[in-house]
Amino acid sequence: MADMRSQTARYRVESASTRSPVEINSVLRSTYLLLAMTIAFAAVTAFVGIALQMPFMGFIPYLIGFFGLSWAVNKTAQSAWGLVWTFAFTGFIGIAIAPILQIYLSVNPGAVVQSLFVTAATFVGLSAYTVIARKNFSWLGQFLTVAFFVVIGMIVASFFFDMSAFSMLISAFMVFVACALILYQTSAIVLGGETNYIIAANNLFVSVYLLFMNLLALFGMGGDD
């Protein structure tokens, strides 16, 4: 979401131009192929982290890794290095969530299965609707920009206040943001506004990651975990 404003501007400019269906379909196929590979890679690193019983890396190292690697992906997306940094980023995410998954698998493995199923169903449903209907969701760019700053504000507030009482509300809000990201990014590809499959796949990966983790939190809270 960090580059949402620049992406929105590019989306509007390039959507106005005419791009052939062949080019758009090529970007779409490449995006989904890379997305599937990165999700699989993140799953592998997560299970490796669980097998090694890796500890929590800490909130600050996580933020540095998340935003630093995201910046590297966007900076090198026009070259082969973009693929390298994409797998570095998704592998990092897999390792980061390993301790959380380990706890859920030991306490309530059903929540993990539910989260995986609902995440997959939601992503497929939203993507299929956008691709088939060719809806323009560029207007969500402004909402996502605002949502980004709201999330930053919540992160800062968590350092000074106990936000646990609002955990369910925050997770529900993040699920909504993740769904909006999926609609926005898929629409950008389908309408020709997004031409770089590396950036598109990375943004969709973040959407899927946010959706899964916050659904996991909701299902966990629903089960008193």
Image: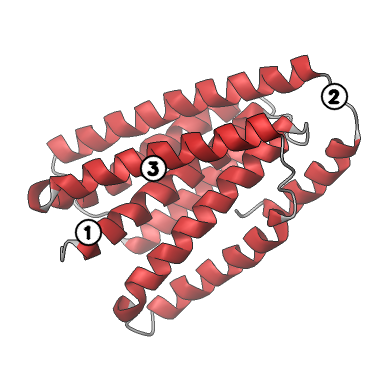
Hey, what amino acid is under mark 2? Arg
Most foreground residue, 39 or 192: 192
* Distance in Å between CA atoms under marks 3 and 1: 15 Å
Mark-to-mark CA distance, 3 and 2: 31 Å
User: Which residue is nearer to you in this view: 85 or 185?
Assistant: 185
Q: Which mark is residue 19?
A: 2
Q: Position of residue 157 (x, y in %)?
A: 44, 80
Of residues 93 and 193, the one nearer the viewer is: 193
In this picture, residue 90 sits left or right of residue 137: left
Q: Callout 1: helix, strand or loop?
A: helix
Q: Note whether 109 is above or below 127 in the view shown.
A: below
Q: Position of residue 33 (x, y in %)?
A: 52, 20
Residue 159 picture quarter: bottom left
On residue 25, the disc is: none
Mark 3, residue position: 119
Residue 143: x and y, percent? 66, 62
Quadrant of res 171 = bottom left
Say which residue appears at 61% left-offset and 30% top-offset.
Answer: 198
Q: Image quadrant of residue 126?
A: top right
Whole-percent x, y for residue 210 in the image: 43, 51
| Residue drawn 65% across the image and 46% down it | 184
Task: Say whether disc 3 or disc 1 marks the residue closer to the N-terminus.
Answer: 3
Q: Residue shown at 32%/82% (left/top)? A: 162
In the picture of the structure, the residue carrying the numbered disc 1 is 220
